[in-house]
Amino acid sequence: MAAEQEKEPGTLSGTAETSAVDFVPEAGGPIVSRAKRLLIAGTGSGVGKTTVTIGIMAALKARGLSVQGFKCGPDYIDPTYHTAVTGRLSRNLDSWMLPADTVREIYCRASRDADIAVIEGVMGFYDGKNPKTNEGSSAEISLLLQCPVILVVNCKSMARSAAAIVKGFQLLDPRVRIAGVFANLVGSEGHYRIVRDAIEQECGVPVIGYMLRDENLAMPERHLGLVPSIGRGELSPFFSQLAERISAHTDLDRLLQAADTEPLEASARIFRPLEADGGGTAPEASRSLLIGAGANADADADAATETVRPPEPRVRIAVAKDAAFHFYYPENLELLQACGAELVYFSPLAGEKLPAGVDGLYLGGGFPEEFAERLAELQEMKQSIAEGIESGLPTLAECGGYMFLTDAIVDTSGRQYPMLGLVPGKVTMQTKLAALGYREATGMEGNFLLGPGDTARGHEFHYSVFEPEASAALPPAYKTKGMRGSKEEGALKGSLVSGYTHLHFASNPDMPRRWIEKCLLFRKMREGLI
């Protein structure tokens, strides 16, 4: 692949993006993060926690601190903000999709060389998978990571009542540590002082800062074209304004004091090869990773070498990465690398053909609908990808990647744009969300990543509806279970697994191993060895 111009982290242009992940497998022993840490939570959705979080990140970075961002829950968009502001790849921490030990490992790996970790909550602080427990909530993440919390309160049209709100959040689960409050959307400095005095007297925690109601500093709506606009740098002035406003009205020294916590330790399990050479050429090498480790995990950890190097690549997997396709959990890519994959990035949006000689293909989510007209015109690119998949190339396509495989994308005005035509049917865009929520996926017969009885966890978030061609419908890839019941979802075709669901590989780390093995088998067949 041709050398590319250096880009800022988080850039999403029309050309292929180089990996933001330089995978290094873990040595034996614990991973220790000594970074300060804070979780910025809201009393509910829409109180301004994303605006406050980004402003705090930008203000701390302006002080010269290395800031590591995280997002509670499965969302891809807010981490894109974080990455653009901090210059470090932001990651998701999700206690429903992932086991507690994995959440801690992801946190410690990413934050151990940072000065401070700033974690943005999801929805309201106690909102999650289960209305009767903390499952899947920001509160659960704060407890898992022993993390102090700054509670963002929308103080519009209230005074002393703000203290009652904070008191309720303190009392619902006394184990959580609400270390401070941020008074958002106050009408004036005088209004702020009233709210501050009430909260500090009644709740015993400091109000560390405030922001005035200022429409010019409201976070842009999360419309479908927002992430590409971040990549083009269009929000950089907004980020700078936020940093200035937060710095002017926030006691950053007090905030840093609240974030001063004990070091956090996690076991190196998911990303640690057991062999000093990091792998080998046999399929068994991929099993040398502690993926899905069981009762012998601790004994295996003790036997591990103290230094490892990245495994020698055993297969090459093409990854679509540009403004149209860019939603990937970093851990999905890292687990592929840990199992021996070399990731080869390319840009369908720039007209780049499927890279030659690859053994697999990953078409992630994104916004193909925003670029449907351009994608429709790139015939050679589409033909190369279609021919690769039809030749048996082991492929996973998620959400936007799945949409790209269909006959056509139809926009909200009724305009139709031809896509790859591998999945019979068309995708129609809607102005309202078509699906949102967690999914537990069980594989269907013929799914090389998840077979019948195998499960993984992920989520759906899309504005489109797939309308299959009844006479040529493909078998489903998954049976998914969500809040509103179960359904069959996606499509299987040869070595293609596709669907709307975004799966997190760390919820079932056998998935990347199976993908590598399928890629090895494909390579042998292509080379005439079997």
Image (cartoon, rainbow, N blue to C red):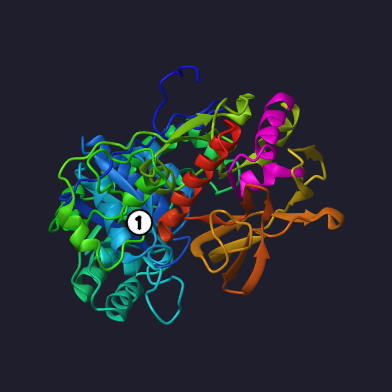
Magenta stretch: dominant secondary structure: helix
Q: Answer above or below: position of 443 versus 356.
A: below
Residue at point 27% right, 55% down?
269
**Which residue appears at 48% of the width and 60% of the height?**
46
Three-letter code for the amino acid on which mark 1 is drawn: Ile
Q: Which residues are magenta?
A: 379-407
Please tell me which residue is depicted at 63% across the width and 47% down the height of the picture.
495
Quick check: 381 left or right of 363?
right
Residue at the extreme bottom of the image, as rendered: 132
Residue 152, percent across and down? 35, 61
Indicate the secondary structure of the residue bearing disc 1: loop
Tell me what residue is drawn at x 71 percent, y 36 percent: 372
| Residue 406 part of the magenta-drawn span | yes
| Residue farthest right in this picture | 471
The residue at which mark 1 appears reads as: 291
Task: Between residue 236 and residue 17, name the one nearer to us.
Answer: 17
